[in-house]
Each structure stands twice: as structure tokens, then as C-alpha cells.
Amino acid sequence: MRGITDTVKHLIIINVIMFVGTLTIGNGELFYQWFALYFPKNELFQPWQIITHMFMHGGVTHILFNMFALWMFGTAVEAQLGSKKFLFIYMSAGFGAVLFQLGYYYFNYMPLYSELISSGLTSTEITQMFTTNELIQGVTESQLALLKEGFPMYNASMVGASGCIMGILAAFGMMNPEAKLMLIFLPIPIKAKYFIPGIILLDVISALTGQSFFSPSNTAYMAHVGGALTGFIIMWYWKKNQFNQNRWDR
């Protein structure tokens, strides 16, 4: 069995501690409200959630799959790159995941919000209805349709290390393109150079169509894409500049 590197081990410990906190503090809801990442327009949003959500998980299956992937791919990447580079990719991919997912929400939310304002609703009324999920008097059918579409985005929350791990997965694939990988649900060995782009493509399709392939329907697909793309860009830059003054030391 493959061993575990120090940084991966510490990340797994932090994730487990946070998960235990989610289960035990405030019946789960309070801890979730503090540390999950909420849409910035939502009053529950706090700046620290940009980091803390990376160490939160929504259930036993969620954390088990992520920690297994972190051990399996993270250990190999840290062993090849060293702890500094590994942690830099891990956290950067998490931030890239946030940027992509929130950007995707804003891209879809702001036109809806503008239409609601143009229809005669005030910002206070819109916030009230999104927060309480109760309609005010006089809402029209067209306004209701917009409210139904915008409600999930306004109240969206994001947890999990998936964005970070997708960055690590991209790094693994770039360093080990011939390594053969398999999905649990599709036990066919596929080379990493085909497997990882395929996973990213499925996430893009799921984000645009809402059709889930191997993940739950509430998965933040654009976060996966953002994390993977960030990991790819970092690895591409390091490879391109590995012999000049921009090279990172282990």
C-alpha cells in the first residue's frame, strides 16, 4: 500500500476535524453557516469562507471520496514536487474553483436581478423574498419565474476539497500522462492524459446542461473546472520556466 506524505496527512486531519465539527457543533447547521461558502450577495457570506469551505464536507460519502482521492493522487504529487509546490497548487486550485463557481453564479444571477429591478421590484424586496422564500403581495407571474430561477443561486452554498483535488489531479496527469486510471463506476483503465481531460469535459457539460454523470446533481461543477484549470496553468508555467529564475525550489 502506498504511504502518505506529510502535507497530505495534515490536510486529511484538518478535513476530518472540520467534518467532526460539522456533525457535533450547533447540530451541524451553525458550523455549516460559519464555514461553508455562500453566494456573496447572501447575508450569510463571510470572507473567511473562501478558505474554510475547502475543509468542509456535506456527508460521509463526500469526505470519504475526497480524502481517498487526496491520498491517492496528492501523495504522488507531493512526492514528486515537494511540499511547497504541492500546497501551492492545492490552495491555488481551491481559489481557482471559487473564482469559476462564483463567476458562473454571477454571470447567471445579475441579468435576472436586473430584470427584477426593471420589473418594479426593489432590491430590499428581492432580498427579502430570496432570504425568506416567501412572496410579497403583488408579484406577477413573470417576476415569479425570475425569482424561482434566481433563488437557488442566491442561496447556494459550497463545501468540499474537490476544487483543490481537481488541481492536484491535473498536476498528476501532467507529470504522469501514461499512468492508467479508472473510475469506480467504470473499471476500464484509461491513460491519465485522456482520463483527466475527459473528467473535466464531463464537468463542463454537467455545468451547462444540469445533467449529472458520476457526481450528485448538487455538485459545483464549475468549481471542478476552475480547480483543474488552475492546476494545469501552474504546472504548465513551472514546466515552461523550470530552467530560469522563476523556478520554484522544494
Image (tube, rainbow, N blue to C red):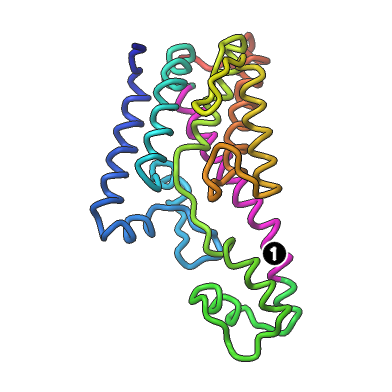
Residue 122 sits in which quadrant? bottom right
Residue 54 sits in which quadrant? top left
Magenta segment, prevailing SS (helix, strand or loop): helix
As displayed, is residue 237 above or below residue 31? above
Query: Going by the image, does 165 lie left or right of 194?
Result: left
**Residue 108 included in the magenta stretch of the image:** yes
Q: Residue 83, position in %: x, y?
A: 41, 20
Foreground residue, 203 or 16? 203
Foreground residue, 90 or 246? 90
Q: Residue 57, position in %: x, y?
A: 39, 45
Query: Furthest-bottom residue in view?
Result: 137
As displayed, is residue 160 above or below residue 173? below
Q: Quadrant of the N terminus?
A: top left
Q: Residue 151, position in %: x, y?
A: 58, 67
The residue drawn where x is 70% and y is 78% is: 143
Q: Residue 77, position in %: x, y?
A: 48, 17
Disc 1 marks which amino acid?
A: Met
Residue 191 sits in which quadrant? top right
Q: Secondary structure at mark 1?
A: helix
Residue pointed to by mark 1:
110
Query: Going by the image, does 99 lie left or right of 23?
Result: right
As displayed, is residue 194 above or below residue 50? above
The residue drawn where x is 23% and y is 52% is: 24
The residue drawn where x is 44% and y is 22% is: 74
Query: Going by the image, does 209 lie left or right of 34?
Result: right
The residue drawn where x is 44% and y is 42% is: 160
**Residue 92 included in the magenta stretch of the image:** yes
Q: Is residue 23 visible in this depiction of the protein?
A: yes
| Crowding at mark 1 (Cα within 10 Å: few <14, some 14-19, many 20+) | few
Q: Is residue 245 visible in this depiction of the protein?
A: no
Q: Which residues are magenta?
A: 86-113
